[in-house]
Amino acid sequence: MGHTAHVSVVAWTAAGSLAAWLWLLLCQGFFWRTDVRLPPAREPDSWPSVGVVVPARDEAEVLPASLPALLAQDYPGRAEVFLVDDGSTDGTGALARELARGRGGLPLTVDAPGEPPAGWTGKL
């Protein structure tokens, strides 16, 4: 590439950068100002339903720390936690049911789909 072509590339890059900055500064409504705040969001008429899916396999060791915090979430709409026990050998499903029993908060459904089909490798 010759000297003239190099200068041309630099000039076009500089012009493009200048154009981008001018567009940001002049056309984007003073986006950098931190003293301008959005109005508070209004409460929706109805909240969407939420389903939280927790895949679990041999997670009995960490469930006592994680599941109660998840079930204690305060959501104004309809919400439910689904724990899918993927063939655990450490009692993950039973422990999850025990941890949810007698607690307030989000309802828990534990599903254990059973043995996987032949040749299924699961998560690798």
Image (cartoon, helix red, strand yellow):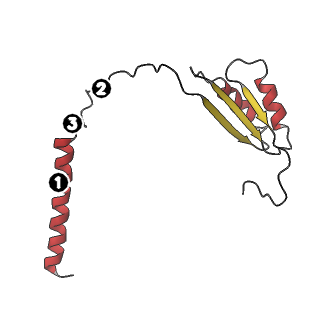
As drawn, the residue found furthest toward the front would be 45
In x, y percent, where is residue 41? 39, 22
Amino acid type shown at disc 3: Gly
* C-alpha gap between disc 3 and disc 1: 16 Å
Q: Which residue is drawn at 78% across and 58% down?
A: 121
In x, y percent, where is residue 66? 69, 32
Q: Name the residue under label 2.
A: 37
Q: Earlier in the sequence, mark 3 or mark 1?
A: 1
Q: Is residue 116 left or right of residue 37?
A: right
* C-alpha gap between disc 1 and disc 2: 28 Å
Q: Which residue is drawn at 15% across and 79% down?
A: 3
| Tag 3–tag 2 contact (CB < 8 Å) | no
Q: What element carries label 3?
A: loop
Q: Mark 1 points at which residue?
A: 19
Residue 62 visible, this angle: no
Q: Is mark 2 on a helix, strand or loop?
A: loop
Q: Which residue is drawn at 76% across and 54% down?
A: 122
Amino acid type shown at disc 1: Ala
Looking at the image, residue 2 lies above or below residue 116:
below
Q: In this view, does 106 lie to the left or right of 39?
A: right
Q: What element carries label 1?
A: helix
Looking at the image, residue 119 lies above or below residue 90:
below
The quadrant of the rendering that contains the C terminus is bottom right
